[in-house]
Image (cartoon, rainbow, N blue to C red):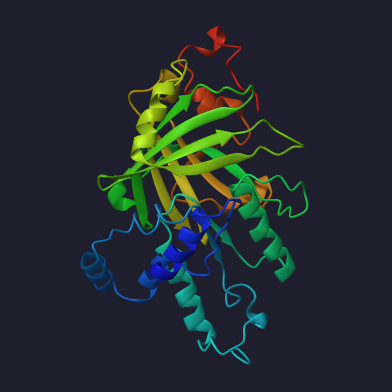
Amino acid sequence: MMALEDTYFSMAEKCAQNVLIIADRGTMDASAFISREAWEKILTKLNLEDIEISDNRYNHIVHMQSAAIGAEKFYTTEDHAARFEGIELARERDNSAMEAWRDHPYVDIIDNRSDFDSKINRLIDLVVKRIGINVGDRFSANSRKVKFVITGMCPDSDFPVKFTDFQVVHHYLHSAQKGFQTRLRKRVKNGRATYTFTVRKPELQGQTVEVKQPISQRDYSNLLAHRDDNHLPVFKTRRSFLYENQQYQLDIYRAPCHSRCQGLVLLETFTTSNDDEVVDSLPPFLKVKKNVTGDPAFSMYNLSIRSDWEDSAEQFCHK
C-alpha cells in the first residue's frame, strides 16, 4: 500500500498543476484488524511510528460510516464481491477502523443521518473546505464548529474513554495581506513533532476558509523569525477522543500565557445539529459552563493578544 501511494505522491510532485490525492484506505486502517502487539511488531520491523504513517502522511481523514450503523436497510452482502461481513461484524469493524485514526489532528466522521447523496455532498464539502476551495453553497452540509467552556474535568486516570494528549504550541506571524491571519503550529506526541502552517482568509460570502499545510522542521524554524510579537505564543494540551461516534478536542491552556487564559479549557467539535441538540449530546463526564461558539473573546487569535484588550482595540478580531 505504501509503495503504491508513494508512486502517486511522486507523480503529483512532478505535476505542474495542483493535485489532490484521495486514498480509499490508509496505512493506519491495517491496525484495526490485528492486535496492537502484532501492529507494534510490524512498525518495529519497518522502523516506523504511528505518527509518521498518520499525521505526516495524510492531511485529512474522512471516515464514511458503514450503512450497518444507522442505515441498516441499505446494508447487504448481495452482489458485493468485497463485502461478506454480517451486520454485527460490519459494525464492529467500522468502529475499529474509526478508532485507528482517532489521534490524527484532522478527522471528520460522516454518519448516516441523511440520504446517500447528501452523505456524498458532505464528503465533498469537507474536502473542498479543507483544501481552501470556495464552492459557495453547492455542497453545503450545514456542518459547523461549536465551542464550549469546560469548568470541571475528572483526573486523567478516571477519564472514561480512550484519549490521546498532544503538547501544542501556536505562533502567530506577520501577514503581508490585510485581513489574513497566518500561524504556525507545533504538535508533539512521545517526543515526535509535526509542523503546520495555516493561512486564515477573510470571510467571503459567509465562509471563512483556512488553508493548512504540513511543513518541515526547517521551514518551521525559518518562519518563526516572522512571528508577530503583538501576540503571545499559545501553549496548550490538546486531548483528542471519540464519544458516541463524534470526535472531540479539549484544549487545555498552559503557562506561560496571558491571565485571560489561565485555567481555560475549551471543548470543540463539528456538528450539523442545532444548539439544544448539541448540548444534550455532549459527553456527560465534562462539566460545561457555557456555549461560546462564535464568541470572538474565545478565538485563539484574540486570546493570544499580548496586551489587554482595552489597549489593543485595533488588533481585536470580531469575526
Q: Nearer the viewer, residue 70 or 209?
A: 209
Q: Position of residue 283 (x, y in %)?
A: 49, 52
Residue at the outermost top position: 311
| Quadrant for the N terminus in the image | bottom left
Of residues 174 and 291, the one drawn nearer to the viewer in this rendering: 174
Q: Position of residue 41 (x, y in %)?
A: 22, 70
Q: On the picture, is 47 further left or further right than 173?
A: left
Task: State the image quarter where residue 100 is shown.
Answer: bottom left
Q: Position of residue 59 (x, y in %)?
A: 49, 52
Q: Is residue 96 positioned above or below 140 on the image?
A: below
Q: Is residue 115 visible?
A: no
In this picture, is 185 found above or below 257?
below
Residue 178's place in the image compared with 8, above or below, is above
State the count of labels. 0
For the point 53% across and 69% down, which residue is it? 24
Could you tell whether 238 is left or right of 244 in the image? Answer: left
Question: Viewed as shown, does residue 272 lie left or right of 199?
Answer: right
Tell me the quarter of the image containing the C terminus: top right
Residue at figure coordinates x 49%, y 43% from the top left: 213
